[in-house]
Amino acid sequence: MGEHDDIEALGRYSRRRFLGTVGAGAVAVGTSGAVRVGTAGAAAPAATPARHVAPALTTHFGRIFDRMRPFADPGRHGLEAALVELGSADGVLDARDALARGPVQLITDPSLSRHNPDNPTHTAGTTFMGQFMDHDMTFDTSSPLGKPAAPTATRNARTPSFDLDSVYGAGPVGSPQLYDPADRAKLKVESGGLFEDLPRMADGTAIIADPRNDENVIIAGLQAAFLCFHNRVVDQLREGGTTDLLDLHTQARRLTTWHYQWMILHEFLPLFVGQPLVNAILRRGRRFYRPGKGEAYIPVEFQGAAYRFGHSMVRPSYRANLAGDNGKPFFGMIFDNSLGGPDPDDLRGGSRAPRRFIGWQTFFDFRDGEVKHNKRIDTKISTPLFHLPIGAIASHSGPTALPVRTLLRHITWELPSGQTLARRMGVTALDGADLDELASLGHRLEHSTPLWYYVLKEAELVEDGLHLGPVGGRIVAEVIIGLLQSDPESYLSYDPRWRPSLPSRDRGDFRMVDFLTYAGVDPTSRGR
């Protein structure tokens, strides 16, 4: 099937399903919802054609494993202090990166990576695609850090599916600020630097459906790439003869979403968990996370622990582009809390300046020798993540050490220990000797370990940090595949035989380099 045939087929599908689902009188694309100044309403899901109206439970979090004891009594004296100590700067998790050596040497001097090693199987962009996926399926805006809360009483402000509501918001009617006023089928993209940027208010606030997608320059660049990709599809649809604005938007959204879902299943999930586990679940089914069609939810074992493995993959510094800083590469720490101003030297988001754009050859492999790597999945977290700028935290409140925030979530959700879940899954659990660095913290944490720490240690010991181990990998893989399989509008659910047909290096496949090339933001076509 050629690319125009593919688009035409999707167009017939979209129009037929739209009219059959909502009736001829309903012409608005999107649903109304609360809209914050500067962002689209994060709580309002987009009403795409045939978008399934999910049961009420799916707007809240849940559990995979019910009736399991938490890793520790949440009211135990000194437990919170022990977790704060574990997750604070200069503690067990801190990689103690040599920040004084500067962002360039942290990338180019291999001796500085001895205690925070690179992952040769991941490129640097894998981290940020994982972050983008997270922001597309989960947003906890209300649960308290370190205070027990019921998952089913806590609202998820994103739809629990990979439907790109973080890009499209509530559609052209419900989120008009996201769309080009001169062409309502297209998303708004701006430029204040050398290349594309998010649309912004006068104070630099990004006008996007999820404010977290402007936390750093890389995730902002990825969001902008999705905007450009959608707009390119709209142009191609017009070339093929589609003129109706509703058709243009809905067909372009579906084609964009299905290519995104393909990359999740075929490129990124295997990097996270290993191809054999992906194959096993697709062939033999999910064992633990088993919602029915239209009943998906985000489990707290995933949201609060296992999927946060990506924090360990973050580098202390990155090369944002090759020539944006007065003709020289722009290197920066991912965050530097001591910096500020309209064009800080770190890679925080929220600013527009000529050098603040992404040259993607650093982050994905365009076969030009310029790609860099992630850090391994292990119990060493890059030092800048212990000192987040307050603006990079969605709640704009402390604590500012990311590992502390993650560990306190284990009290919030009363999560079981990693050892408990290993036994429940029937896999060999790590023992106290594997985790003896936790013994000095008390509370027998080496024997009943917070799930996030356990997942990182398991990856480090069992898989050499290249991808997740059996407990973490099983949770992450089953939830991601489950979200795709339980969404009646995903390609995997609606038409599992579908194959990408937009231009790609390998016919029948579609990778991130193909996505960026089609979007027109790739470095090879624009001389970055």
Image: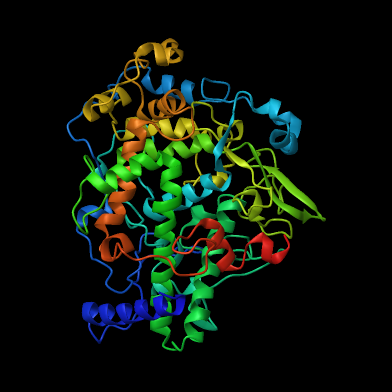
Which residue does the image show at 34% across and 15% down from the upper left? Answer: 431
Q: Horizontal placement of 93 versus 244: left or right? A: right
Q: Is residue 477 placed above or below 156 in the rendered structure?
A: above
Q: Position of residue 346 (x, y in %)?
A: 68, 44
Q: Is residue 306 visible?
A: yes
The N terminus lies in quadrant: bottom left
Which residue does the image show at 35% across and 73% down from the upper left? Answer: 30
Q: Quadrant of residue 261?
A: bottom left
Comparing 75 with 116, the one in front is 116
The C terminus lies in quadrant: bottom right
Q: Position of residue 469 (x, y in %)?
A: 38, 31
Q: Quadrant of residue 299?
A: top left
Q: Is residue 182 placed above or below 355 in the rendered structure?
A: below
Q: Quadrant of residue 31?
A: bottom left
Q: Horizontal placement of 276 versus 20: left or right? A: right
Q: Position of residue 86 (x, y in %)?
A: 47, 22
Q: Position of residue 419 (x, y in %)?
A: 30, 22
Comparing 107 with 308, the one in front is 107
Which residue does the image show at 56% across and 25% down from the upper left? Answer: 94
